[in-house]
Amino acid sequence: MLLSGRVALVTGAGQGIGKAIALKLASWGADIAVVDVNLDSAEQTAKEVKAMDRRAMAMKVDVVSVKETEDMAEKVFKDFEGLHILVNNAGITRDGLILRMKEEDWDAVLNVNLKGTFNCTKASLKYMSKVRWGRIINISSVVGELGNAGQVNYAASKAGVIGLTKSIAREFSGRNITCNAIAPGYIETAMTAALPEKVKEEIIAKIPLGRLGGPNDIAEAVLFLASNAGGYITGHVLDVSGGMAM
């Protein structure tokens, strides 16, 4: 299979896009470390991975903590005897117009979305470097490219992820480790499902393909970049937005 013998660590994998990514990689042969702040959700995803006859472990990790991310990467490498693929998907929002935004809302979003990506990447690179093979896929956002009113903290964090991605790609290309970002547009999740129908229609009107994306759209893109098919791509931002970022 496409990812046979590979071990993938996916953060924010308890639900939504992260869960779809974990299950997609497992369906193509990877063993999965399911990381989330909610252990119950992580365990449910791990259970579904094991039902595919793949190895899985569920871990509760605060990606903002250096120690927890270091312990996480070490455990995955030791228990699964490898760590080849990292998907930095964990992220939060704390929306608000800049003049009303509280400092703690700015800090929380930058900490989880940007520092968390830095922490998990730094911890994982130690083990990828040992085998001189790795695929790092960071989930950014079209908001990090285009900006969005009321999301200055989120936009800054996701733009930072893009800069981080390109810098890591340059640092580690000589060790056969690629680093790319995916920039999703509007994706059908529990949050978007709760939006009023009129708001949904206004959003869809801005999307050239005329529909919201689904978690599987992002998972398929991750699969491509995680496999040998995407092995000659690094430092790239792949927009999966239905054409929003054209």
Image (cartoon, rainbow, N blue to C red):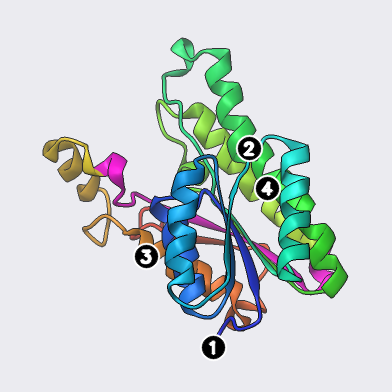
Q: Give how far apart the Cα atoms at labels 4 and 1 are.
A: 33 Å
Q: Which mark is residue 236?
A: none
Q: What residue is disc 3 on? A: 216
Residue most extreme to the bottom:
1
Give the crowd class for mark 2: few <14, some 14-19, many >=20 residues within 10 Å: some
Mark nearer the N terminus (4 vs 2): 2
Can residue 47 be seen in this snapshot? Answer: yes
Q: What residue is disc 1 on? A: 1
Give whichever of 174, 3 is nearer the camera: 3
Q: Which mark is residue 163?
A: 4
The amino acid beneath tag 2 is Asp
Q: Secondary structure at mark 1?
A: loop
The amino acid beneath tag 1 is Met
The amino acid beneath tag 3 is Asn
Residue 108: percent from left, percent from top: 58, 26
Residue 171: percent from left, percent from top: 83, 59
Quarter of the image for the N terminus: give it: bottom right
Residues in magenta? Answer: 172-192
